[in-house]
Image: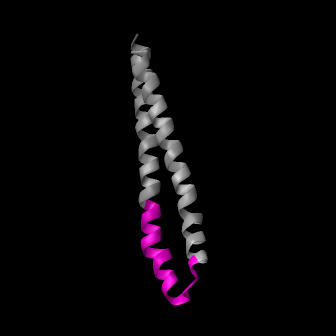
Amino acid sequence: MIGAAIGGLIALAAALVFVVVGLMTVIGGAEATEQQIIPGFRPDNPGLLQRAMTLLGLWGPILVILVFCLLAGWRIFSVVVGAL
């Protein structure tokens, strides 16, 4: 019984870690966009397609990481709550 409770707490902590990692990825992407990419567009003056591809190349993987982290966190949480 105690082992199941400890395992549940560990699983809830893991779910929280997944959510935090996903949110930290978004925050890092926002900072990179604001501090590196957008200022880099000014002197280079790239075309619209190049700007879009640059932003997609950064935000595509970030959004995939966010979705998988949130799904993993939610799934772990739902398993723990369902086991109670």
Q: Is residue 47 magenta?
A: yes
Comparing 67 with 1, the one in front is: 67
Q: Residue at x 53, y 61 (%)?
A: 59
Percent of width and height locating residue 22:
46, 48
Quadrant where the C terminus lies? Answer: top left
**Number of numbered discs overlaid on the protein picture:** 0
- Does the magenta stretch mainly form a helix, a strand or a loop? helix
Q: Residue 67: give x, y in percent of width and height.
A: 51, 45
Q: Residue at x 39, y 13 (%)?
A: 2
Please check the rendered image and state whether residue 37 is part of the magenta-colored stretch, yes or no: yes
Q: Quadrant of the N terminus?
A: top left
Compared with 17, 9 (above or below) is above
Residue at 52% across, 56% down? 62
**Image x and y of residue 61, in percent:** 57, 56
The residue closer to the viewer here, 20 or 66, is: 66
Left or right of 22? Residue 64 is: right
Task: Decide: is 68 above or below 52.
Answer: above
- Residue most extreme to the bottom: 43
Quadrant in the rendering for residue 54: bottom right
Residue that protrudes farthest toward the top in the picture: 1
Which residue sits at x=45%, y=34%?
A: 74
Q: Which residues are magenta?
A: 28-48
Compared with residue 47, is residue 10 higher up or lower down, i.e. above or below?
above
Q: How is the image coloured?
A: one colour
